[in-house]
Image (spheres, rainbow, N blue to C red):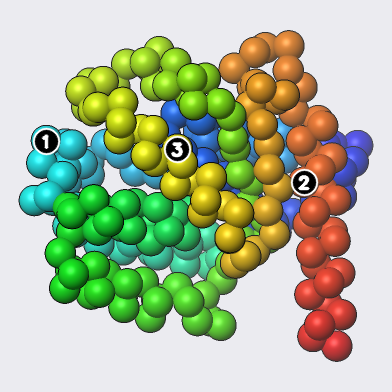
Amino acid sequence: MNLRDKYQIPADSVITIAGTVGVGKSTMTQALSQALDFRTSFEKVDGNPYLDKFYADFERWSFHLQVYFLAERFKEQKRIFEYGGGFIQDRSIYEDTGIFARMAYEEGNMSDVDYETYRSLFDAMVMTPYFPHPDLLIYLEGSFDHIISRIKQRGREMEQQTPISYWEGMFHRYEKWINNFNACPVLRVNIADYDLLDPNTSIEPILEKVGHFIQHSRKWTSRQLN
């Protein structure tokens, strides 16, 4: 019996991984994909025409970057569901507005007009009954010190040049955001308990929880429709 059947995870499931920069979303995405034989959907960093410019000048490029991410993630979400599911997705579209666009606006890096334009666009694209929401959002969390250590270890130049205060602000925003998130079921996973960078850590306890959450969610949805 394969792990997907063992833990009763439907083959058409769509699971999104969320969490602050450096928490291990890509590692979790790869691990779940291999265990479940699912396709992956990674955040596109290479080839992004705004990312390097944004890190050099937050105020000048925040709006451009957020609109670019929104368009790319919307297209990817559509592609995932056209395939019929069976995907692990690295980062959710909900973080774009709940974390990054709001952070840019509140810190003075996006004007009132630009932020209102962005929010209107997001609501029209995502906050409708026609938008396909994931079966489950896995939220990765950990201590700030642990996460900063990971950012330093992976050594991306543009991240190394970013002030620690930026990462700390983002960390606290994520904590607040996830406590109010309700677009789909949420499974919280602490990287201190399941550090998949440790070769001795098994993915199976996470799979067991994933199966339970998705089964419960689909039964609840079925009852609501009936």
Q: Which residue is mark 2?
A: 210
Q: Amino acid at mark 1?
A: Ala
Q: Which mark is residue 184?
A: none
Q: Quadrant of residue 209?
A: top right
Q: Is residue 224 visible?
A: yes
Horizontally, is 70 left or right of 78 in the view?
A: left
**Residue at point 45%, 73% (across, down):** 126
Q: Secondary structure at mark 3?
A: helix
Q: Amino acid at mark 3?
A: Phe
Q: Which residue is mark 3?
A: 171
Examine the rendered structure and indicate whether residue 67 appears above or below residue 147: below
Q: Quadrant of residue 70?
A: bottom left
**Residue at point 72%, 24% (across, down):** 193
Q: Earlier in the sequence, mark 2 or mark 3?
A: 3
Q: Secondary structure at mark 1?
A: helix
Name the mark nearer the viewer: 3 or 1: 3
Give how far across and how far down residue 192 sits, in percent: 66, 22
Quadrant of image for the N terminus: top right
Q: Amino acid at mark 2?
A: Val
